[in-house]
């Protein structure tokens, strides 16, 4: 029996066939300081609710995957120490050893699929790190997208990554990359990268129909939706490139590697931008949550 516990609100929505949007929990434990982390998590849940869907933030506590968290659980997670950052490799480990764990994109996809949730909103996905030809540092998010049937709404690959190689790996894995209302792939904090989007759709209903057609013809794996941040909230790519290059150089000199690379770089970029990168990050997560809710509603309407 799969060790899952559902929040009553989420269970009721799923039983009735209503729209539910999965949300990750590493944004709480590894993305922001207390109490802002919990404030943002609640705000993102609020965006999903105000858009007509039910939010299901996912985390691991006491040997169970929790699908949807109570207010007390969010508060606990926001203050807890030694919370594991869970991906495919260590999700079962955390459950078996009853460790507290926050789910990354890959682990959230797995948990959402187990729970029967089709849509997941996040900030940006992991991908191929710069210099991966030497380090082989490639996120498990990419292979998870090839395996697990989840629509992942993001602002594209995180801008600290090698975007072109990330898209190439996704193409090799057969993962559709669809940019919402744009022909150019977004670059996380910025509306546009230098990469042309493989696919484009302009309506939530079109995304839902595309996902349902993939299922009808037996195609496995997820869909990556790249949702450009609103223009008023972005940091232009030309400015971000300078900050990213400096932070990446410093990380290399400091010997940062593995799971520590992304949080270290994001933290350093936060310092270099004087806090603006965090404001932009929050805005893009909310924007993704809004689109994810629209897609979930369309899926529920036509299921």
Image: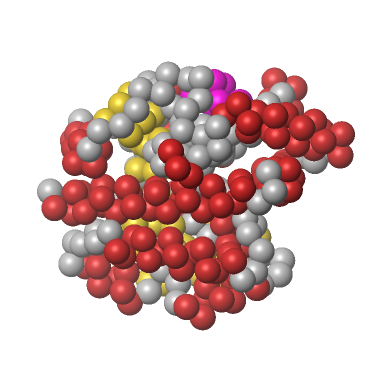
Residue 235, position as x, y percentages in the image: 55, 38
**Residue at screen point 25% across, 33% down:** 202
Q: Left or right of 168: which side holds 201? A: left
Residue lying at the far bottom of the rendered structure: 72
Along the line of sight, which residue is nearer the eye, 157 or 60? 157
Q: Left or right of 236: which side holds 294? A: left
Residue 48, position as x, y percentages in the image: 34, 60
**Residue at screen point 80% across, 31% down:** 249
Name which quarter of the figure residue 36 lies in. bottom right
Residue 159, position as x, y percentages in the image: 58, 33
- Range drawn in magenta: 162-170
Name which quarter of the figure residue 222 lies in. top left
- 4 relative to 297, above or below: below
Along the line of sight, which residue is nearer the eye, 278 or 255? 278
**Residue at screen point 77% across, 32% down:** 246
- 292 relative to 224, above or below: below
């Amino acid at each position: 029996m799969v060790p899952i516990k559902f929040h009553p609100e989420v269970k009721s929505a799923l039983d009735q066939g209503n729209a539910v949007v999965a949300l990750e929990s590493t944004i709480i434990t590894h993305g922001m300081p207390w109490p802002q982390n919990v404030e943002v998590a609640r705000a993102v849940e609020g965006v999903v609710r105000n858009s007509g869907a039910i939010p299901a933030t996912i985390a691991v506590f006491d040997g169970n995957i929790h699908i949807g968290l109570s207010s007390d659980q969010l508060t606990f997670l926001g203050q807890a120490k030694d919370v594991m950052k869970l991906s495919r490799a260590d999700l079962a480990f955390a459950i078996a050893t009853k460790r507290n764990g926050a789910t990354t994109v890959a682990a959230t996809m797995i948990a959402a699929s187990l729970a029967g949730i089709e849509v997941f909103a996040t900030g940006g996905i992991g991908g191929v790190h710069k210099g991966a030809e030497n380090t082989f540092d490639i996120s498990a998010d990419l292979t998870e997208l090839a395996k697990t049937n989840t629509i992942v709404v993001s602002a594209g690959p995180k801008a600290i990554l090698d975007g072109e190689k990330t898209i190439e790996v996704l193409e090799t894995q057969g993962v559709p990359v669809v940019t919402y209302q744009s022909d150019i792939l977004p670059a996380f904090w910025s509306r546009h990268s230098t990469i042309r989007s493989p696919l484009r759709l302009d309506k939530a209903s079109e995304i839902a129909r595309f996902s349902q057609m993939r299922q009808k013809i037996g195609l496995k794996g997820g869909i990556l939706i790249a949702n450009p941040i609103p223009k008023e909230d972005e940091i232009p790519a030309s400015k971000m490139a300078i900050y990213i290059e400096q932070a990446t150089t410093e990380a290399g000199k400091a010997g940062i590697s593995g799971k520590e690379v992304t949080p270290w770089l994001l933290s350093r970029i936060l310092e270099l931008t004087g806090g603006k990168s965090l404001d932009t990050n929050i805005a893009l997560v909310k924007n993704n949550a809004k689109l994810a809710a629209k897609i979930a509603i369309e899926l529920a309407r036509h299921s």
